Every structure is written in C-alpha cells, then in structure tokens.
Amino acid sequence: MNDQHQANSWKRMSFKGNKVWVATEANGNLLVEKAKVLIKYNLKQDYEYRVKPESLNPEDQAVPARKKPEKKPGKKPDKKPDRSSKKPDIEASLPDNCIKIYTDGASSGNPGPSGIGILFIYEENKKKISRYIGKATNNIAELTAIKVALEELKRVDLPVRIFSDSSYAIGLLTKNWKPKKNQELVNEIRALICKFFDLAFIKVKGHSGIKENEIADFLATSAIKKDLL
C-alpha cells in the first residue's frame, strides 16, 4: 500500500449489499479520482477496488450476514463414511491358524458365460483360482465358487472362514433355507461342510473397498473375459 492510501481516511458504506471501507477526504467527503472511489473489504488487504460513487449506499443498507446454524447440544456432526479398504471387524477376532477364503461368482447375462474367483489366505501363504465354468446363473457361480474352495482344502482340522458377498449362498448354507433351485449343488456343499472341524461363513458387502473381496471378484470376471477372447 502506498503512502497516499495510508493517509486516506475511511468510512463504512455498502456496495452490492456488502459492507466496505470507502476512502474519504479529511472532511468526510468521498475521495473521487477519475470519477471513481477507492474501496476495500478489509483495511488490512493489499488489493483494492475502484467503483463509481453512485454504486455506493449507506452502511445500513448492507445485507446482514447469515448466521451459522447453531449446533444442537450433544449431537456430533455427521462424518463421511470411510471407504478405504478396511477388512471386516470380525476378521480381527478370527481364531488362530485360521484359513481365510474369499469367494465370488460372476455371470455375464444371468444365465450366461460364468466364472468363479477364489482367494485362499493362510498365514503368509496365498493361492488364487480363476476358472471359467461355462453357461450358468450368478447364483450357481456363487455356490460353485464355495464348492470348489472346499474341495481344494486338504486340512479339515483347521478353522476355516469363508467370506462371500452372496446373501443367497450364505442363506442357503447357514440358515438351512430350502433351495427351490440348484438342490443338488447345495446338498453337495452341505456334505462338504460337515467334514470340517470348524467352518463358518462371513457375509461381506460387495464392492465396498475390501481388498480381498475385490480380488475374488476380479478373478471371477477375468475368467469370463479370458474365455470370450
């Protein structure tokens, strides 16, 4: 700011509904230079504006600023959901030496070309299966992924946890729903389950950022794409 501006006197007025500081002469009259008046929104700001005197109004014509809504006591502001790739909370309480299996099935057309994806995790070891199963429905693909996963396991004495985003498959296998379709496939899986000492299913939400579940989905859809090429 130059010395001339520092020597200016200022008074409050309004410009387009906003309160501003306007440069004045010593007697209080507006300091007009080249038919315009110097204004500032804040006296400490370095940048400035020049406007026509007729565009200025008395200070009391400024539009009052809106007050921020008062926060209700005891109510915390809503937080955005964390969509980072967090594992389900239940995974933190899994038994020791647990074999974790993420399964998924995919169908292009329902029915249509279908694939299964399976991710096995045991301690530091991982194994993946991506397999095309021919023409099937999405439900058959989901069930087949679980069946293949159980058939692949050699150890039945270790605890096993199967993660799936299929409400249909988990309902049939944990709630004893009576299958209207795919009875033979469901019965085969139930027979396999009985062989294991400690086996449980865990429902996860699909496409919610769970890394392992996304891998299973990728393996299933990739199997379809490879066959169609």
Image (tube, rainbow, N blue to C red):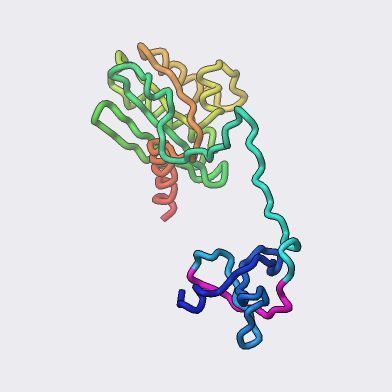
Residue 83 image position (x, y, % from top left): 47, 40
Q: Is residue 209 above or below residue 22?
A: above
Residue found farthest to the bottom: 34
Residue found farthest to the left: 124
Q: Is residue 19 above or below residue 168?
A: below
- In the visual, does 61 lie left or right of 144? right
Query: Which quarter of the picture shows residue 183?
Result: top right
Query: Which quarter of the picture shows residue 34?
Result: bottom right
Residue under the point 71% across and 73% down: 56
Number of numbered labels in the structure image: 0
Residue under the point 54% across and 21% down: 172
Residue closest to the eye, 203 or 66: 66
- Residue 49 is one of the magenta-drawn residues: yes
Q: Is residue 83 above or below residue 187?
A: below
Asked whether residue 116 appears in the rendered view, the answer is no
Asked whether residue 105 appears in the rendered view, the answer is yes
Query: Which quarter of the picture shows residue 117?
Result: top left
Residue under the point 50% across and 64% down: 44
- In the visual, does 43 lie left or right of 229? right
Residue 185 image position (x, y, % from top left): 49, 25
Residue closest to the eye, 69 or 210: 69
Q: What segment carries the magenta color?
A: 46-56
| Quadrant in the picture for the C terminus | bottom left
Q: Is residue 162 above or below residue 50?
A: above
Residue 179 image position (x, y, % from top left): 59, 22
Residue found farthest to the right: 61
Residue 88 image position (x, y, % from top left): 43, 28
- In the visual, does 58 lie left or right of 80? right
Residue under the point 59% across and 18% down: 177
